[in-house]
Image (cartoon, rainbow, N blue to C red):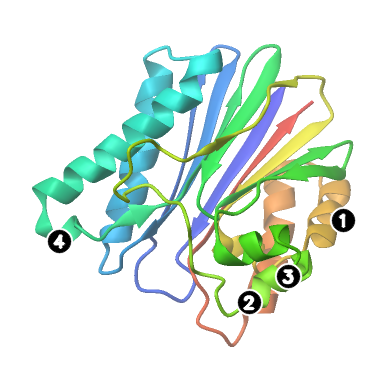
Amino acid sequence: MIRFSLLSDKGCRENNEDSVGMYQDGEAYCFLLADGLGGHGMGEVASELAVETAVVKFAQGSRGDGFLKEAFEAAQESVAGRQQEDRNCRDMKTTLVVLEVEKDQLRWGHIGDSRLYYFVKGKLKERTLDHSVPQMLVSAGEIREKEIRRHPDRNRLLRVLGTDMDEVNYQESQPVKRTGHQAFLLCSDGFWELIEEKKMEATLKRASDPEHWLASMEEIVCKNGRGTNMDNYSAVAVWID
């Protein structure tokens, strides 16, 4: 059984430039989250375009090995196309993270610094690696993982949709067998910057359902962000029982 919950809030900003989405077709599900960049509301256009375009690909029957490639390429084309059509949108860009759940297996892909966390039996097993300067510094051994959240170059992204590129530099996971006792958290940086992984695990173990899990984490995010100009924050929780 699949249970899920979606959350998106503008935080202390005027506009919410995050977008979340899901689509179900029988036993197949697609969950998506994007964080738009560009200001003046244009980031919102980019994130919505990316999510909607990827959902259409899934709804049209794209599945399995080819879906994520098609989804990210189509999303890039949609964002780039709008940039060409509308001068106000020429600087807009967006991250994108997508989780595909099939009858027997799972896979995910991402670009930018919106993350996917994968938990098995309540324990964090894996997370996506940000396409950002601090993540690159971690990989090079120059800073520690825990320093990413407060690094001065935190917002310098190396890959996003909407940049001029010959091919979409998204990252895709290996297929994972659907076994049950699995949980996923898709979230924008406005969410994960304000809650550490140990708290994600602790709230997951106490939660009765995905809504409860998200609500518990949101309470922590808002507490840690109090007194700051909180960014938009969004998250999608998925439980596979």
Please determine whether, in this image, residue 108 is positioned above or below residue 93.
above
Q: Which residue is mark 4?
A: 88
| Res. 53 visible in picture | no
Marks 1/4: CA–CA distance: 43 Å
Q: Amino acid at mark 4?
A: Asn
- Label 1 secondary element: helix
Where residue 142 is drawn, which disc sits there? Answer: 3
Q: Which residue is mark 1?
A: 202
Kindly identify the residue that appears in the image at 66 percent across and 71 percent down.
149
Q: Tell me which corner region of the image, top left, top right, bottom left or bottom right, holds residue 173.
A: top right
Q: CA distance from mark 3 to mark 2?
A: 12 Å
Residue type indicated by callout 1: Ala
Q: Marks 4 and 3: CB-CB under 8 Å?
A: no
Query: Disc 3 or 1, which lies upstream in sequence?
Result: 3
Label 2 is placed on what type of residue? His
Residue 168, by quadrant, is: top left
Q: Earlier in the sequence, mark 1 or mark 4?
A: 4
Q: Mark 1, mark 4: which one is toward the viewer?
A: 4
N-term-proximal mark, 3 vs 2: 3
Point 11% across, 52% down: residue = 86
- Disc 2 marks which residue? 151
Q: How many marks?
A: 4
Nearer the observer, disc 2 or disc 4? 2
Cα distance, mark 2 to mark 4? 31 Å
Q: In the depicted view, which residue is nearer to us: 140 or 48?
A: 140
The earlier-in-sequence mark between 1 and 2 is: 2
